[in-house]
Amino acid sequence: MVDDTWSSALHRLWQAASRAEEVSALADDVYAPLLATPGVHLVVGTRWEDPQILRYMRALRAGSDSPVITATARSVPEAAVREPGDEPVVTRIPVAGLDDAGWPEAELLRRTPEATFVVCTFRLDHRGWASLGVGVDASADVAAVEGRLAQAVDVIVACHTGIIQRGREARRGADDALLAEASLQMDSSLDVEETLRRVARIAVPAVADGALVHLLRSEGPEFVSATHVAVRQQRALEEIGRENLWLAALLARRSEDEDTVFLSGPELDGSPFADTAEATEATEATEADGDGDGARPVAAEADRHSTVISISTLRARGRVVGSITFVYQRPEARLPGSAFLRSLATRAALSIDNALLYELRRHAVLSLQEHLLPSQLPVTDQWDLSASYEVGDPMLDVGGDFYDAVPRPDGSIALLIGDVCGRGAEAAALTGLARHTLRTLLEQGTDPGTALSRLNRALRQERASRFLTAVVATLAPQADGTALLTTCSAGHPSPLVLRSDGTVSEVLTGGLLLGVLDDVSYESHEERIGPDDTVVLFTDGLTESREAGGAFFESILPVRLAALRGFDAAHIAESLTQQAKAYRASGQDDIALLVARWTGVPPGADLLPHPLQLVRTAR
């Protein structure tokens, strides 16, 4: 015959189990129906950690509405023999035969010494086990009681398994979200140190209570960043990262290990993370001094939980780039898994490696760019020369902008500026060819038009696939204190002249791009400039800097240049570059400027070349 009362209770128990977030929430739905079973006068459950650590005991007696709950963490060595295997075990034991050394339930059962204790022991997870038992008298149907215990335990185990599974799924979802956010945050910066700082900040407190990040250098681990949930621990953790020999030696030994390692307890002896009496004493001493901001020992923050550290090697593209050390002061159940830490370390390593590669590339681009430009400009008391070069985006390949200033045999000086179409190795090769060809020809006294024609012929002979623009201007001193400005252009933006009275004029030039047709001639334009007049040559990176509304810097360049009247060449070059850079909301082209301010010479002065000195050009 079916027991409808127990069947209904079991149904309610399954429903409660599907909603429960903790197994303890099932207690009322388990204990009351079992206690209503004929012949049962006591229901008692225990929860054990490891074989012999009693975590708590809960008992409910017939006729009582309030359970007896004993929360403890005491060791019961004799109980280890009760630890079940993988399957639940049901046992019948006379109450009179229970030994207190292994049966903490005995003291609750002795009110009815002639009773029998029917108990089911079962495993909940790898960390511990549990038992559910009833005290029955002679009127009980023990076989039926055993069946009900087994059914109740099935529900409890299923509930616990479901809670663990849901927790794992939630944890996996949270981990996936954290990893995705970590990737976005780390990948949003190509600065190495900023990327490393973000690695530490993302992980704390979501993953750990503290984090240290080191780069691997040829001489060993180099500390970069640290963070901790406790603000007062920030300095202590940074000091450990920079100076602690124990940690440095450990990181050096593990530099090639791929697996994440967890260290705790005796493994941390001698380290700044050890849970020692000395750490506690140091904490108390610090607090006694009243220094609220003092750096407490890291291990001293573990008020209730022992300190654990993990070390993950940061490996990307087959090479080790560093390591990340996490510090935990939390329950074991809240420690991240090795798989999660490996995934986080892999993502961090790729972001760091990308930042390192970008840094190397940026330095290579800037270094190559510098070698394509003159390191020094000539000066005499006749002219004030300066230049400015702003790389549009160091992540891109080397650009094709170039400039130079060349003293000539007749005492004049030739200014040249150009722009090769595109970027990269081929553009860099043409840049070097163009600048050095023009420089050589102009040094020999070749006029600007002929120099451009011969450069064009050289480009065509080399079958260059790119074109370039250039402008050459010579400044020849005159006896009346002026200078003859001769300008020749090959499709390049026209130079500007800032007069001493503040007016700005454009030098009228024209000419075909270099490297397009075989035989091209270039005409020159001549005009006079007076003392304190300034000639400004530039590439289109200056004029084509565009604001958010779409306007180009070219539209305001004359006004901005006029406002610089009276300043020396260096100030004009740097100011215009920075103004264009601040102006543009879009555009990544390089900006090159070459500025020459004519100082003038008195009538009848010797026009032979003046003694030259060299000054380093602006970069």
Image (cartoon, rainbow, N blue to C red):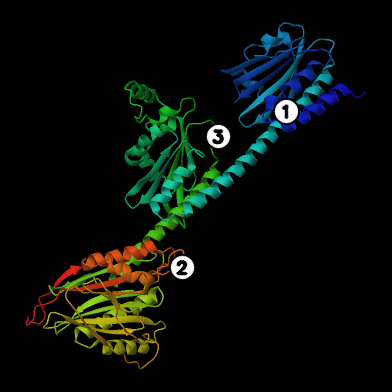
Counting residues from the start of the chain, the first of labels 1 and 2 encountered is 1
* Crowd class of label 1 (few under 14; some 14 to 19; many from 20; radius 10 Å): many
> Looking at the image, is mark 3 or mark 2 earlier in the sequence?
3
> Label 2 amino acid?
Gly
Q: Nearer the viewer, residue 587 or 441?
A: 587
Residue 516 appears anywhere in the view: yes
Labels 3 and 2 touching (C-beta < 8 A):
no
The percent coordinates of residue 212 (x first, y second) are: 41, 42
Q: Earlier in the sequence, mark 1 or mark 3?
A: 1
Assess disc 2: are there few (<14), some (14-19) or many (≥20) residues with their C-alpha within 10 Å of its C-alpha: few
Kindly identify which residue carries mark 2.
550
Tag 3: amino acid: Arg
CA neighbours of label 3 inside 10 A, class few (<14), some (14 to 19), many (20+): few
Based on the displayed image, in which of its 4 quarters is residue 480 positioned?
Answer: bottom left
Compared across the picture, whether 608 is left or right of 202 comes to left
- Viewport quadrant of the C terminus: bottom left
Between circles 3 and 2, the one closer to the viewer is 2
- The percent coordinates of residue 462 (x first, y second) are 36, 87
Say which amino acid is labelled 1: Ile
Q: Residue at x 37, y 81 (%)?
A: 468
Q: Residue tagged by mark 3?
A: 334
Read off the residue under disc 1. Answer: 156
Instruction: Give the side of residue 598 with respect to residue 584, left or right.
Output: left
Check whether the beta carbons of the residues at disc 1 and disc 3 lie within 8 A of each other.
Answer: no
Q: Quadrant of residue 575?
A: bottom left
Which mark is nearer the camera, 1 or 2? 2
Instruction: Please state if 387 lies on the left or on the right of 382 as rendered.
Output: right
Q: Position of residue 399 (x, y in %)?
A: 37, 72
Asked which secondary structure carries label 3, the reply is helix
